[in-house]
Amino acid sequence: MIRFVRRPAFPRELNHELVWPLAFLGLGGAGWLWFRTGWQLPGCVFMRWTGWPCFGCGGTRCARHLAAGDVPQAFLFHPLFALVVLVAALWTLWSAVWWLRRDPLRLRLAADEAGWTRLRRGLLVALLLNWFWQCHYLRA
Amino acid sequence: MSEPLQIHIARQTIQLGVFSAEEVAAGLANGRFTRLDLAWTNGMAAWKPLGEWPEFATAVPSSPVDAEPAVASVIPWEQGKSLGSFFATVKLAILSPRETLATGRFAFGDWLVFCYVALVLSLPFQLAALFAFGSKNQQIAELMTQFGAAAAAEQFLATSEPPLWATALIMVVGVGFAPMSYALTGLVQWLGQKVFRLPVALERTVAATLLASALVLLLTIPLQFLGFSLLLQVGAALLLGVPLCIVYYRALGAATGTGAWVQFGISCFVAFVLCCCCCGLPFVLLGGLTAGGV
């Protein structure tokens, strides 16, 4: 069982509506500034030595295209990274609404043990699929 | 047909998951859950300890562990936020980490703020060093030349260097997300702990990493005064390397309740695995050996 629930926060629970939007906006702003400078990051050592992409290969190019507003091209370079950014943006938007509404209930993903196992396996499959795509697209 | 009762359980700062009433009753009986664990189900306005749920009154054993009051934190920063408590915490974390840090709650938010305070305190020194001593590229190139890499030094100097104001801006913006990178280190450290089956909570590990990083940050502030000579700065950093490692791992070990050597070992393991996976260390080593004619 995996589903979204709206529930109150328990004492000392991490404020996910504050921490992740701040991290997203901070990193997004820093990334945008970095791309504005035109400076380059060094290439991937793993790719250079093996000829195969690592899990992160294409991530910077994806971010660069996202910063330029070219979402389809960003998605081609690193689908998983683009998806994570999309989810982070949606969460930031949701958090803003939550703060404005002063809602006492928080949106949380709830799962039983079987659900968490399914989620972990899903993440692993997503990583592998993404890597197969990286191998196909980045080595072409 | 009505939906079976789904109970959300949380302990300290972690959500343990969603369980049926039968699973909770069994968990209470076999010690998986305690009466202090917080629980919530649909329709409740707030979380309530399992010990206060009438449904589980018979299933809750009154164990002596539950009866004992939790040890209160003696860390000044967790008792109140002020510059005084900040420096008192720094002093205690360096001088007597085992006696103080082991009692800490280590909530992420508390230590995120602590880390930001350390960064803000360190920033003026870094900016002053930048504007007083300027870019170190020329000194780096001279060093490279001394080590026989004249061509690389020339190439290094030829690459476009960001203006001073841009570097300063990056430093200032960097303060905003630097704790996130420390937290990421903590996350990796936690993964290492998981590999070695150490039952330390993620939040505690991350918060402890934030504290230890802040300590190192503060202790390296005086190095900014040596900015006029890169060689001196690197030499001092190398001399300080071992003491800094001791401070860092003593704090991390005490805060996670594991031990300095355990955390140092995990860091070495994590760094090695990361290097193997991401940085192609074996290939670099192989390349070095081949080039060296071994």
Image (cartoon, coloured by chain):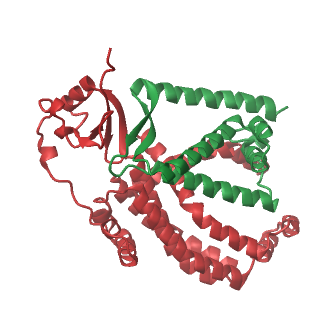
Chain colours: A green, B red
**In screen coordinates, is B171 left or right of B26?**
right
- Name of the residue lying farthest toward the top: B1
Q: Which residue shows up at 29% across the image and 44% down it? A: B46
Q: Position of residue A80 (x, y in %)?
A: 66, 36
- Number of dots carrying numbers: 0
User: Is residue B272 something that shows in the picture?
Assistant: no
User: Is residue B105 something that shows in the picture?
Assistant: yes
Q: Which residue shows up at 22% across the image and 26% down it? A: B26
Q: Position of residue B149 (x, y in %)?
A: 83, 66
Foreground residue among B89 and A92: A92
Q: Quadrant of residue B278?
A: top right
Q: Quadrant of the N terminus of chain B?
A: top left
Q: Position of residue B213 (x, y in %)?
A: 49, 64
Above or below for A16 versus B260: above
Foreground residue among B269 and B42: B42
Q: Position of residue B36 (x, y in %)?
A: 22, 43
Q: Quadrant of residue B91?
A: bottom left
Q: Quadrant of residue B167?
A: bottom right
Foreground residue among B215 and B108: B108
Foreground residue among A128 and A82: A82
**In screen coordinates, is B272 left or right of B170?**
left
